[in-house]
Amino acid sequence: MKKLTTLLLLLIGVCVSFAQNHLYRIVANNKTGYIDNSGKIIIQPKYNNGTDFFGEYAAVRENGLYGIINTKGKYVLKPTYPVIQTGLETYVIGKTANNSALIDLSGKINFKGNVLRCAIQPDYLFAYTDKNETYVFDKKTGKQVLYSKYFLSIPYKDNCIATNFDRDGNKETYVTDLRGNILVPENTYKLIDNYKDDVACVQINNDTYGAIDLSGKLLFTTKYNLFFYENTGFSEGYAVVELQKAKGNENDFNTTYYGYIDKAGKLVYSDTTFTKAYPFTNGRATVELHGGEYKIFDRNFKEIVSDNDEAKLALKDDYNLVQADKGWRVLDKSGNEILRTEEDVESLEEPIMGHLLFYSQDKEDKELFGFINLKTKEKTNPIFEQIDTEGFKDEIFAVKVNDRLAYINESGKIVWQESGGTSIRPLNIDFMLRGIFSAYDVTTKKSNGWATSDNIPKKNKKGQFAKNKLNVVISTTAKTTFLNSYEGITVYVANTTSKNIAFDAMDSKLTMIIQAKDTDGKWKDITFLPRSWCGNSYHSLTLPVNEHWEFSMPVFDGSMETEIRIKLTPEFKKKEFYSNSIKARINPAQFFYQQQYYPKGIMDPYSN
């Protein structure tokens, strides 16, 4: 399957909720503004940055600080914080270098502490701290109604699952309601899953499972495994269970198969040929058979799609997508074919968005996307370089055409597109960049599992660098670009000593950090190296005698005038080398704010 392609709409670290969107973020002349779903500009582009609207509000940045505006472009919270995390209808998290606070849109601080994130429910607000504590507030009054030293799940109706891992990695759980009543005491069960479909699955011991209702009552016990990998809990009255075949067939190495149980714990359907089973969605469920074939059932376990098709799981509100002998078939809920195509639809995890079926084609080594309208059967040419895989948000969603942001509606019509091309510009951000200086070691024949770089060292020219030392130099004349979109300047690391120099590295990234002077004149880091749990990520790089590496460093822009320099630490916790300093402009959040990082899969070793 091809790599999932996602449009990154924001270059800032914010939590954004797309529910009830009425205005949409646009960028024109490197400024942020907002349009409605017809493409009409409602708030002129004038902000240095901004989030999508969450309900009736959006966070925007001017002069290095964020405030909150309403749909008329009026400030309800004046620019105050270097970082604002949004996604809440009436509260935001304001972050400074030393603390964070939960504030309402009048500017009142409701809770002060190191709040990492928040979640909002119809009547309650959840604030999670850096210690995995949970504070719950009444949304209307702002008063605290519940505290847990554990992490509380988002409530299902009134019930929350409290989870904690002790120092030995053991998981401790209990169930509480939002009034503080303990429904299932701690250590009652080995594991408690989140509530789904009014039921939470539990593991009683190593080989006994069950389910509890909203009162905490145990509904049944079973030997069927409810906590296998990809466990999904109950959905539309049924839960997938993992089963074991009877012993005796020495040639059958695949002893696991799957089935479905109801809320009484009764096994209602199973088949030893099922190698995977998926939960019910919109009255349908898909199972995978040996050989990669699929079946799709309705809630009575009547086949909608037989194993004559190699089905591709894509159960949307109105459509099933299945792979036939040639190409793909789109079926309605009853299994009736409404479209057949031989286009490639596998580049996206969910190729159906609304009534549009997206496909991809490779043109001149570039993957482009088009779509087929499932209502009209009209097909567009593949012109989109990227699409927002979050899908439609209040009737339109974002795409990228000719390297420009655009929005299309449910009929596929472009309602707004960024005018002109994107010019090379300074980098104006409000977070710390992660690990930007990568290099290649010509003395190492192959990688032992670490990521490599194509930044090959070059020979020093006569008189180019100071003699007999490790040089770290920021050039004020060697202009370049950074990430092909931003103005850059060249940084040199040169060896003019008589010996090769070894550097500690992590996935070919040197321990090189950009620093800037804060308002007190102290040097502080504005970039960082990510952490990796994989031991193979850590290695060394060698810079031979009379050679140098060249790096591109962004030209920053921001509200604060300062100086920047490079700090290089060839060996961990040993002597540090510093470059010359140059004048620059940055934003205050670059001193402290690291964007939340989400691993791209189980093989992604980074935690930040």
Image: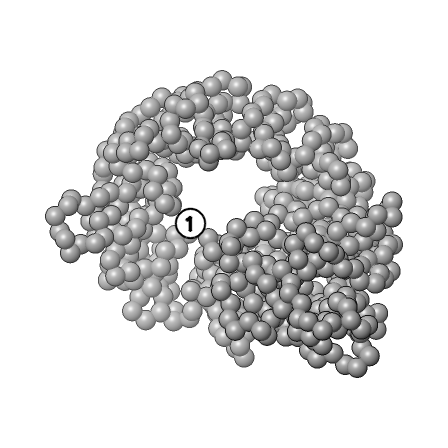
Whether residue 155 is visible to the viewer of this picture, yes or no, is no
The residue positioned farthest toward the bottom in the image shown: 462
Left or right: 26 in relation to 150: right
User: Would you place residue 232 above or below residue 540 in this image?
Assistant: above
Task: Out of 17 and 298, give the one closest to the viewer.
Answer: 17
Do we see residue 562 in this rendering? yes
Front in this rendered view, residue 18 or 396: 18
Kind of residue at disc 1: Asp
Q: Quadrant of the N terminus?
A: bottom left
Q: Tell me the quarter of the picture where residue 324 sits.
A: bottom left
Task: From the viewer's side, name the closer residue of 96 and 109.
Answer: 96
Does residue 555 sit above or below 138 in this rendering?
below
In the picture, measured across the screen, residue 209 lies left or right of residue 418, that is left
Residue beneath the point at 41% across and 34% down = 193
Mark 1, residues whose alpha carbon is within 10 Å: few (<14), some, or many (≥20)?
few
Q: Residue at x 52, y 73 (%)?
A: 445
Q: How far across and down, in percent of the image, does residue 341 sit?
A: 38, 69
Element under disc 1: loop
Residue 154, percent across and down?
52, 33
Task: List the residue tagged with mark 1.
Answer: 317
Q: Residue at x 51, y 67 (%)?
A: 447
Asked which quadrant contains residue 75, the reply is: top right
Q: Position of residue 66 (x, y in %)?
A: 77, 45
| Residue 504 in the image: above or below residue 181 | below
What residue occupies the far front of the structure in this picture?
498
Looking at the image, which residue is at 53% across and 31% down? Answer: 151
Q: Position of residue 319 (x, y in %)?
A: 39, 55
